[in-house]
Image (cartoon, helix red, strand yellow):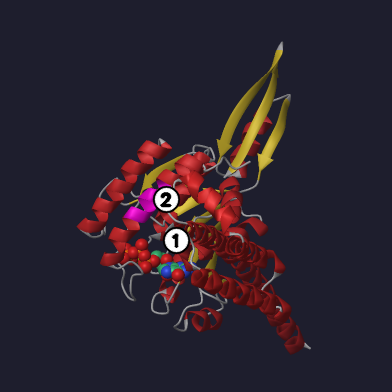
C-alpha cells in the first residue's frame, strides 16, 4: 500500500490531510486536482518476510512453501532448518528454496530468532512466523499484516479461538492456553485468547527487539509479555488453523503440564524483573 | 572441639585439593578467571584447618555447637556460591553459542548463494 500525506495551504494556515491509496493512479489523479499541494511523505510498499521454522518437516515443507508462494506471491520467505534429523535440508536445496540451515539444534526460540536477525539484516518491515507443518493458512497473512500497516499494533497474533473455526487442538491444551491468557491479561494488560499461537506478524521495531532478545524454551507466550513490557502494542486477529497432516508434534501431552507451569512462571518473572528495551 | 585426627584429614585433603587446582591451571584445563573462586574456597578451608581458633570464634558468634559443624557450614556455603556462578557461566556460554550458530547459519547461506552464482557464471562461459 502506498501511503501519502498531503499538506495544503488554506489561505491562513497549512492543513495536513492524510490519504491512503492502494495504487498510484488514484494518488496521481487526486494530486492533479489539488493546487498548491506538497507531498511530504510517499512510502514504498512494506517488505514482508515469512519465516518458516522447520524441524524434521521433510514430509510437509514442500507443500507448505508451495502453498505459501502460490497464495502470497508478493511476499518473501525463508525456511529455518533447525538441524533436522531427516532430509529437510536436502529437500530445501533440491527445490531451490530460500533457506537458512543451523549447524546445531537451537530449538524453536533460537531458530525463530535467527529468522528475525535475517529479516532485520535484509531490511524487512514485517516478519511473519509461519509453521513448517502446514497448520497455518496463508490466506490469513494479509489479515496479520493489516494492523501493522495501519499503525494499530506492532505485534499481531493469529488466534483460532476468536471465531472458533477450524482445528481447535486438545481440551487439555485449551485449558492451558486459557490459563496463559489470564496470566498475560494480569501481567501484560492485554487480551490474548491464543497465547501459544505461532502464527504472528512483527513490525520492524519488534523484529529488531526480537533479534536481540527472544525467549528460548517456549517463546510464543513469553515473547508477548516481553513485547508488552517493552511498550509495544499487541493485537489479535481471527485465523483458521489446520490439523497437522504429517510428521510428529514437538509437544507431547506430558510435556504440556510442565510447559504450562514453566511458561506461567516465566511470564510472571518477566513482568517483575524484565526491563523496557531502549 | 576438633580432634587432631580430623584436623590432619582436613589439612591433607585441602592440600591435595589445592594441588589439583594448580595442576589443572598449569595444564591449561581451567582458566584463571574460574579457578579463583575454587582457589579462594580452598584457602579458606586451609586457614580453618590451621587455625581452628578462628573458626571457633565464628561458631560462638553464630551459635553453632561445634567447630566441625562450622567448617561444614563454610564448605556448603562456598559450594552453593560456586554452583550458582557455574549456572551463570553456563547461561552466558549458551547465549554466546547461540549467537555464533545464528551468525554461522547466515554466513553459510551467503557462501552457498555466492557459490551457486559462481557456478552459473562458469556454466555460461
Ligand atoms: N527451528 C525449530 N523449529 C522447530 C523445532 N521444533 C519444532 N519446530 C517447528 O515449529 C513449528 C511448530 O511445531 P509443532 O510441533 O507443530 O508445534 P505446535 O504447532 O505448537 O503443536 P501441534 O498443534 O501439536 O502441531 C513447526 O513448524 C516445527 O517444524 C525446533 O527445535 N527448532
Ligand atoms: Mg504444529
Residue under the point 68% across and 22% down: A8
Q: CA distance from mark 1 to mark 2?
A: 10 Å
CB under 8 Å between discs 1 and 2: yes
Ligand 1 quadrant assignment? bottom left
Q: In the rendered image, is residue A6 in sight?
A: yes
Q: Residues within 10 Å of mark 1 (few under 14, many from 20)?
A: some
> Which chain hosts label 1?
A
Q: Secondary structure at mark 2?
A: helix
Question: Mark 2 — residue?
Answer: A266
| Residue A225 place in picture, x, y as percent | 45, 44
Question: Mark 1 — residue?
Answer: A217
Residue under the point 59% across and 55% down: A211
| Residue A267 place in picture, x, y as percent | 41, 47
> Which chain hosts label 2?
A
Residue A277 image-quadrant placement: top right
Residue A220 image-quadrant placement: bottom left
Q: Residues within 10 Å of mark 2 (few under 14, many from 20)?
A: some
Q: What are the residue bounds of the magenta stretch?
A: A261-267
Is the distance from the Cβ of mark 2 to the nearest ligand 1 atom less than 8 Å? no
Q: Nearer the viewer, residue A12 or A262?
A: A262
Q: In the rendered image, is residue A69 in sight?
A: no
| Residue A71 place in picture, x, y as percent | 44, 62
Residue under the point 47% across and 84% down: A87
Determine whether B47 is above or below A83 in the image: above
**Residue under disc 1 on the same chain as residue under disc 2:** yes
**On the picture, is B61 further left or further right than B96?**
left
Q: Secondary structure at mark 1?
A: loop
Residue A264 within the segment the image draws in magenta? yes
Q: Which mark is residue A20?
A: none
Residue under the point 59% across and 53% down: B54
Amino acid at each position: 500500500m502506498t501511503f501519502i500525506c498531503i499538506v495544503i495551504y488554506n489561505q491562513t494556515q497549512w492543513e495536513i490531510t492524510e490519504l491512503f491509496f492502494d495504487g498510484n493512479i488514484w494518488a496521481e489523479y487526486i494530486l492533479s486536482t489539488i493546487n498548491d499541494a506538497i507531498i511530504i511523505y510517499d512510502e514504498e510498499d512494506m517488505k514482508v518476510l515469512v519465516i518458516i521454522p522447520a524441524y524434521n518437516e521433510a514430509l510437509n515443507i514442500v507443500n507448505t512453501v508451495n502453498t505459501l508462494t502460490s497464495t502470497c506471491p508478493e511476499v518473501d520467505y525463508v525456511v529455518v532448518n533447525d538441524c533436522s534429523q531427516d532430509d529437510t535440508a536436502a529437500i530445501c536445496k533440491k527445490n531451490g528454496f530460500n533457506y537458512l540451515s543451523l549447524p546445531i539444534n537451537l530449538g524453536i526460540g533460537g531458530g525463530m530468532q535467527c529468522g528475525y536477525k535475517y529479516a532485520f539484516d535484509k531490511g524487512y518491515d514485517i516478519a511473519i512466523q509461519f509453521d513448517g507443518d502446514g497448520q497455518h493458512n496463508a490466506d490469513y497473512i494479509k489479515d496479520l499484516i493489516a494492523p501493522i500497516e495501519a499503525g494499530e499494533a506492532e505485534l499481531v497474533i493469529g488466534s483460532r479461538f476468536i471465531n472458533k473455526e477450524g482445528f481447535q487442538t486438545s481440551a487439555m491444551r485449551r485449558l492451558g492456553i486459557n490459563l496463559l491468557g489470564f496470566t498475560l491479561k494480569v501481567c501484560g494488560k492485554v487480551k490474548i485468547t491464543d497465547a501459544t499461537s505461532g502464527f504472528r506478524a512483527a513490525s520492524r521495531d519488534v523484529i529488531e527487539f526480537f533479534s536481540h532478545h527472544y525467549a528460548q524454551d517456549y517463546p510464543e507466550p513469553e515473547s508477548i509479555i516481553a513485547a508488552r513490557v517493552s511498550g509495544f502494542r499487541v493485537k489479535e486477529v481471527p485465523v483458521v488453523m489446520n490439523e497437522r497432516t504429517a510428521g510428529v508434534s514437538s509437544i507431547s501431552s506430558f510435556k504440556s503440564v510442565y510447559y504450562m507451569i514453566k511458561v506461567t512462571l516465566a511470564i510472571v518473572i518477566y513482568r517483575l524483573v524484565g526491563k523496557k528495551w531502549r | 572441639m576438633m580432634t587432631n585426627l580430623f584436623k590432619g584429614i582436613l589439612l591433607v585433603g585441602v592440600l591435595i585439593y589445592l594441588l589439583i587446582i594448580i595442576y589443572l591451571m598449569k595444564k591449561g584445563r581451567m582458566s584463571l578467571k574460574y579457578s579463583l573462586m575454587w582457589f579462594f574456597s580452598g584457602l579458606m578451608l586451609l586457614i580453618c584447618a590451621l587455625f581452628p581458633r578462628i573458626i571457633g570464634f565464628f561458631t560462638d558468634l553464630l551459635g553453632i555447637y561445634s567447630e566441625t559443624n562450622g567448617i561444614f557450614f563454610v564448605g556448603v556455603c562456598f559450594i552453593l556460591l560456586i554452583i550458582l556462578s557455574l549456572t551463570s557461566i553456563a547461561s552466558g556460554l549458551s547465549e554466546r553459542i547461540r549467537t555464533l550458530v545464528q551468525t554461522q547459519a547466515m554466513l553459510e547461506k551467503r557462501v552457498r548463494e555466492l557459490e551457486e552464482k559462481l557456478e552459473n557464471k562458469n556454466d555460461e562461459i
